[in-house]
Amino acid sequence: MTWPFQIYGTYHRRNDIHKLYKGQQQSGISTPTNCPGIFIFTGNGANRAGYQDVFQKDGRLRYTGQGQTGDMKMIAGNKAIRDHVKNSKDLLLFQQTCRTGIVRFKGLFICAGWDCEIQKDAQGNLRKAIVFTLIPQDYVSKKVKSLTIQAPDQTPLHTLREKAFKAVAVPELKSKHTPGTVFSRSKAIRDYILARAEGKCEHCQRPAPFLTVQGYPYLEAHHILRLTDGGPDHPKSIIALCPNCHREAHFGNQQELLKNKFLGIVSVLEQNLGHLRFND
Ligand SMILES: [Zn+2]
Ligand SMILES: [Zn+2]
């Protein structure tokens, strides 16, 4: 199951988004409850007056958070963006078009970090604004896939686990140009999950069907709670699957059943490995 939005497709915000998923209809950041996604809106809209969102040449977006007047605070929609990975929520970006109420889908994004910048608020007063660095999820997934996977026997599992759990936190960026954090975050979690699987599908327990060119057992990382795979994730909601089990998880008729089974498997695995404590 995936989101019903095509990249660059146009949608009626109220009918195509909020009728299906609920959430605040007027806000630039919409956070429906019981929904695996957060909807964020950029550009031209009346609700974004005074906000300065800037697309960089490389597809990254500097996205200004929420708060009409005064200094912005890390609450509500801003907090939801910062914690979207930890909370297993996809971040869906829509851009206002010149037609009222019609938005264009720009794809799934990942919050790489945030920093503060002085901007004018709705009344023209200078204030501290929270600005997020958002990276297209596709870009992160491709980049991470092209990285060499850590050999399972090179680094002890507990070291990989520690790295993966530490990687979950979204950093306050010291520099505006550190999208690399998001790749290393993603890689740390991937390395750990594949090492945890010890060459077998964590669901059916069959050995990986083949070795990769680097000589490692081929398994796929599946996100149990989100609708899509890709980008950095929380180690407690990722399972390593053989290609068969993975296809079934996305296209089979027992998806709910499998989801609960996967959560059970991962929870037991993590409990058994839990002799190391982390602040996650
Ligand atoms: Zn399997
Ligand atoms: Zn998957």
Image: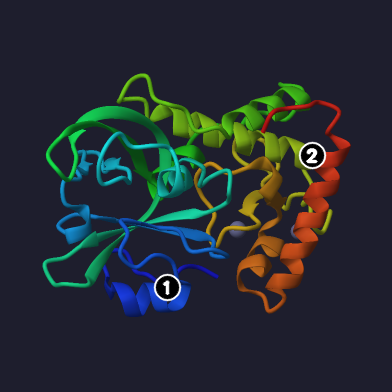
Q: Is residue 142 visible?
A: no
Residue 134 % position (x, y): 35, 42
In the displayed structure, 33 sits above or below 255; it is above
Answer with left or right where residue 267 lies relative to residue 7. right
- Residue that carries the numbered disc 1 in the rendered image: 4
Q: Residue at x 43, y 37 (%)?
A: 74
Ligand 2 occupies quarter: bottom right
Residue 207 % position (x, y): 80, 50
Residue 33 % position (x, y): 54, 63
Q: Amino acid at mark 2?
A: Glu
- Circle 1: element type: loop
Q: Residue at x 53, y 41 (%)?
A: 232
Q: Residue 269 is drawn in which quadrant? A: top right
Q: Earlier in the sequence, mark 2 or mark 1?
A: 1
- Residue that carries the numbered disc 2 in the rendered image: 198
Q: Tell me, what colour scheme is on the image?
A: rainbow
Q: Residue at x 55, y 70 (%)?
A: 1
Say few, some or many: other residues with alpha carbon within 10 Å of mark 2 (under 14 / 14 to 19 / 20 or more). some
Which label sits in the foreground, 2 or 1?
Answer: 1
Q: Residue at x 76, y 63 (%)?
A: 260
Q: CA distance from mark 2 to mark 1?
A: 35 Å
Which of the two residues, 174 or 60, is positioned nearer the viewer here? Answer: 174
Which of the two residues, 236 or 76, is positioned nearer the viewer here? Answer: 76
Mark 2 and mark 1 residues within 8 Å of each other at the beta carbon: no
